[in-house]
Image (cartoon, rainbow, N blue to C red):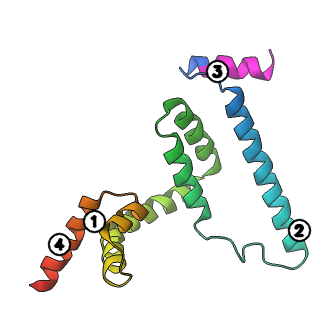
Amino acid sequence: MGIDEHNRRATSRQGLTPPTAADRFKEQMLTIMNEYEQARRDEITAAGGDADEDRDPLEFVRDLADGYEQRRGDETALVRYLDQVARQLNPEDVRALRVAAEAVKKVTPLIIRIAADEDGMTPAQIAEDLGMTESYVYRILREHRANFEQ
């Protein structure tokens, strides 16, 4: 039994549809891009440079969020993606991400207030950037102003 046949049987036992040619192509492209990025980082390091100098410190988190959002409407794609993510993370990584998520949830109202009061952003802009509803942003701002005026 070949690898494709094995994968088809395994996914059918799990109630999943086998990956399409487009799915396989996308995964291959991601693998190629990751390999290129790693090779480039190795080159920079070998030349005495800092491969992380221009890297976004939240790049992995942003990629994780983007990948989840892109697939959450397609259960099959989401299951595959979550399996891929699970194989990249260890328990300590998951703990750090979970605690970070809790911290971000608690700091979100402060971020909203700073964006509105200090950065001059509109509630619509804030809501769009946060991926939240305008009504939530307005509620947080109202609550802050009510507490501030007392």
Report the residue marked by disc 3: 10
Closest to the observer, 102 or 69? 69
Q: Which amino acid type corresponds to the residue marked 3 in the rendered image?
A: Ala
Residue 43 disc label: 2
Earlier-in-chain disc, 3 versus 1 = 3
Left or right, 111 with respect to 45, comes to: left
Q: Residue at x 68, y 19 (%)?
A: 8
Q: Estimate the x, y position of residue 4 in percent, counting from the top left.
A: 76, 21
Marker disc for residue 61: none
Secondary element at tag 4: helix
Q: Which residue is mark 1?
A: 137
The residue under label 2 is which amino acid type? Answer: Glu
Q: Tag 1 or tag 4, which sits nearer the N-term?
A: 1
Residue numbers of the magenta segment: 1-11
134 relative to 55, above or below: above
- Alpha-carbon distance for marks 3 and 4? 52 Å
Locate residue 67 relative to residue 36 in the image: left or right. Answer: left
Which SS class for mark 1?
Answer: helix
Please give the name of the residue rendered at 77% of the width and 72% of the height, measured from the top-left corner: 51
Quadrant occupied by the N terminus? top right
Structural distance between the alpha carbons of marks 4 and 2? 52 Å
How far apart, in angstroms, are the residues tagged by discs 3 and 1?
45 Å
**Mark closer to the chain start, 1 or 2:** 2
The verdict on residue 92 being magenta is no
Q: Residues within 10 Å of mark 3 (few under 14, many from 20)?
A: some
Please rate how many residues cluster around mark 1, counting C-alpha atoms within 10 Å: few if below 14, some from 14 to 19, many from 20. many
* Front of the two marks 4 and 1: 1
- How dense is the environment of label 4, judged by Cα within 10 Å: few (below 14), some, or many (20 and up)? few
For the residues labelled 3 and 2, the Cα–Cα distance comes to 39 Å
